[in-house]
Structure formats: structure tokens, C-alpha cells
Image: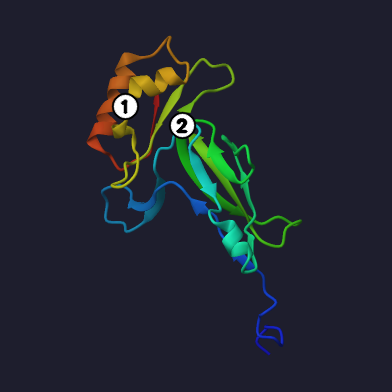
Amino acid sequence: MNGQSADNGKDKKKILEPTFHFATHFVKIGDDYTTDTIPVTELVMAGQLLADFPDFPRFAAKGFEKAPVEPGEYTELSKDEEAIVATVPGYPKVVKIRRKDQPAPVTVVSIEPLLQIPADGMQVTLAVHPPLAEGHSLHHFDLHALIAEQGIVFGIDPLAIEEAKRSIESREKEFKGFII
């Protein structure tokens, strides 16, 4: 017996995976001789659509169910509760989690914020990820405008901003954090 039911799996649920609305590429990190790659996502803005199920009614008519998806940190359900959107600018992450109460893994979509601000608000770290050939990276944006949009206007270190800009413009293939 091969583990399938007598009807050859016809009772198995058809699951529709979400569509992700951001670019992800596997990038070789560093200049050494390793062949290791890691996923790098594009920079997204607050309010940007991250995941949904377009044309779901058409698939539902064919017996499909939506894969379980939920918002993680710095994301939320859209007003119609059919999509996940970013609440801050940053880099999307997708993680599948197995839960005891769910038969299928849950896909959690979260954001690593572009600007990481601790509770005391006294220090801000700018997250710089490797740029992608396709998709939005920091070199497409005005860094000063992005910082100001987040309400950060006092105590900015101009030397740290210049160092971050040099790193962004050189398109380094490293993940960096700059205390600005």
C-alpha cells in the first residue's frame, strides 16, 4: 500500500496558495568562493499590498480552498480582510509555521522595518539590504524623505546618513544596519 486512499487521492483538498506582490530573489552574499545564496526581498512601502488570492471565486468554483495566511509583525489584513498589507516601509518576510490546531502550515507574512526604532525612541537603525536587479531597493528612493516620512527629524547623524548612502549607491551585497 502506498499511503493513498482507494480513490487515488480524489478526496484530497485542493489548496490555492497566495499570490505575493513583491520581488524575491536568491542572492549570493559576499565575495568568497561559497555558492550559498539567501532570499532577498525588495523594499516595500507602508500600505503596499503584499499577499492576496486574486480570482479566488473562479478557483473556489473548482473546489479550491485558500491556504491559511495571516499577518505577522508590521502587516495587517486589508479592510476587506482578503489581503495582507504592509504597515511600515521595509522588507517582507514569509515564513510557514505548523500549528497544532491547523492541519496545513500557516503562511505568515511580516515586515522587517526599514527604520528600527526601540521603545524609548532614542536610537534609529536604518536597515539596508542587498539591492535586487528587479524590484525596489533603497537606491530608488530619497533616503532623507523616507526618514522624514517616519517622523524622524531631530538628532539625525549626517555622517551616518552619508555612510549609508555610500553603501546603498555601491550596491553592496550585504545586510547592514546604520545607527542614524
Q: Quadrant of residue 121?
A: top right
Mark 1: which secondary structure? helix
- Residue kind at label 1, given as amino acid type: Ala
Q: Quadrant of residue 165?
A: top left
Residue labelled with disc 2: 89
Choose the circle earlier in sequence order: 1 or 2.
Answer: 2
- Residue kind at label 2, given as amino acid type: Pro
Q: Nearer the viewer, residue 19 or 178?
A: 19
Mark 2: which secondary structure? loop
Q: Indicate whether 148 appears above or below 154.
A: below
State the colouring used for the structure image.
rainbow
Residue 179 placement, left or right of 94: left
Mark 1 Cα-neighbour bin, 10 Å: few <14, some 14–19, many ≥20? many
- The residue that appears at 47% across and 16% down in the rendered structure is 151
Give the farthest residue toward the right.
Answer: 101
Which quadrant would the N terminus be assigned to in this image? bottom right
Q: Nearer the viewer, residue 131 or 37?
A: 131
Report the number of discs. Answer: 2
Residue labelled with disc 1: 164
In contact (CB < 8 Å): disc 1 and disc 2: no
* Image x and y of residue 88, in percent: 51, 30
* Image x and y of residue 132, in percent: 32, 45
Residue 109 placement, left or right of 8: left
- The residue that appears at 44% across and 25% down in the rendered structure is 125
Q: Nearer the viewer, residue 169 or 173?
A: 169
